[in-house]
Image: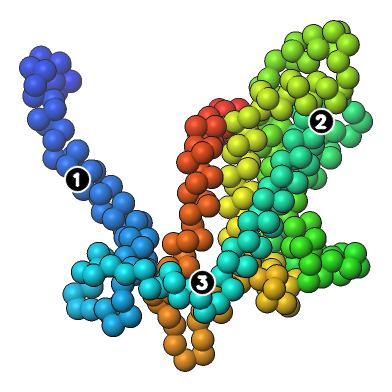
Amino acid sequence: MPDPIAARRREPAWVRPLRMAPRVVVVYSLLGLLVVFMIGPYLFIFGTAFKETYTLVSIPPKIIPDQPTLENFRSIFSTMPFGRWFLNSTVVATASTLGTLLVCSMAGYTFAKKDFYGKGLLFSILLATLMIPGALMLVPAFLVTNALGLVNSYGGLILPSVGGAMGVFLLRQFIETLPSELEQAALIDGASEVGVFVRIILPLAKPGLATLAILSFTGSWNSLIWPLVIVNSKRLYTLPLGLALLRTEFQVNYGATSAAAVVSVVPLVAAFSFLQRYFIEGLTVGALKG
């Protein structure tokens, strides 16, 4: 009986790609359909933002409008305090991200490079908090914020989102990969603990910090539930909360909603484009270490 493995080894080099061609075509076709399925809604929203009201619903549906218009963008800035919501989201997301980077980098550095009693147990408890659903934390967070007198204020919007177990875990994993000899050499040269952290650890941890910055900024920018709980003044509405107002009891202004969604995603795209190189490097290091 002929050996199929030996027969394949004797076949010419051009036969193998030809034999694999149907499988490659099927795989790439499925991947192409998956890409269309994933980005299709985003393309439709982007096209709808530039459509006139009477062309929003057409058969067959069109992604690219025949006569693009900026009327929907003028509408969201002239008929509602969209600029104020955008500013509120920018302030809250930026402050929350900076606070998260500061808290998580210090905690991550401590867990990665310092030895103290109960370190393993404390880190295990910290990781265990990741299993608690976010909805369960709303009531305790509101009670604490109310006790501090921060309800309906920027402080109330920002403070509960500062820090986080995932950020500490991410930076701890990244800082552990940094050689301890650098820290010891700096201490021998007379640097203080703060100096080592600021001048040695933070510059070398840029990929991890960039990864956490993108995740934190995106999470705070898209947050809807917490602003809905803590804010009752339209002056402090963030973009997700303001966009919810575009849907009335009887109708939805799809053109204005799509235009607002397009504008609101611009900062996220800009932040990701600026930090993309560090973001990919940070995820790769974290994956290899974890």
Disc 1 from disc 3: Cα separation: 47 Å
Disc 1 from disc 2: Cα separation: 50 Å
Q: Are marks 2 and 3 in contact (CB under 8 Å)?
A: no
Local packing at callout 2 (Cα closer than 10 Å; few below 14, some 14-19, many 20+) is some
Q: Amino acid at mark 1?
A: Val
Q: Are marks 1 and 3 in contact (CB under 8 Å)?
A: no
| Residue 47 visible in the current orientation | yes
**Between disc 1 and disc 3, whose residue precedes?**
1
Of residues 39 and 76, the one nearer the viewer is 76
Q: Position of residue 59 (x, y in %)?
A: 19, 78
Local packing at callout 1 (Cα closer than 10 Å; few below 14, some 14-19, many 20+) is few
Q: Position of residue 71 (x, y in %)?
A: 38, 73
Placement of 54 over or under 225, stated as above or below: below
Q: Residue at x 18, y 75 (%)?
A: 60
Q: Which residue is mark 1?
A: 26
Residue 229 vs residue 13: left or right? right
Q: Residue at x 78, y 26 (%)?
A: 198
| Residue 128 visible in the current orientation | no
Q: Amino acid at mark 3?
A: Phe
Local packing at callout 3 (Cα closer than 10 Å; few below 14, some 14-19, many 20+) is some
Q: Which residue is mark 2?
A: 110
Check residue 77 in the rendering and tell me which mark sits there, or answer none: 3
**Between disc 2 and disc 3, whose residue precedes?**
3
Which of the two discs, 2 and 3, sits closer to the camera? 3
Q: In which quadrant will I find the N terminus?
A: top left
Placement of 198 over or under 137, stated as above or below: above
Of residues 67 and 199, the one nearer the viewer is 67
Q: Amino acid at mark 2?
A: Thr
Q: Position of residue 30 (x, y in %)?
A: 25, 50
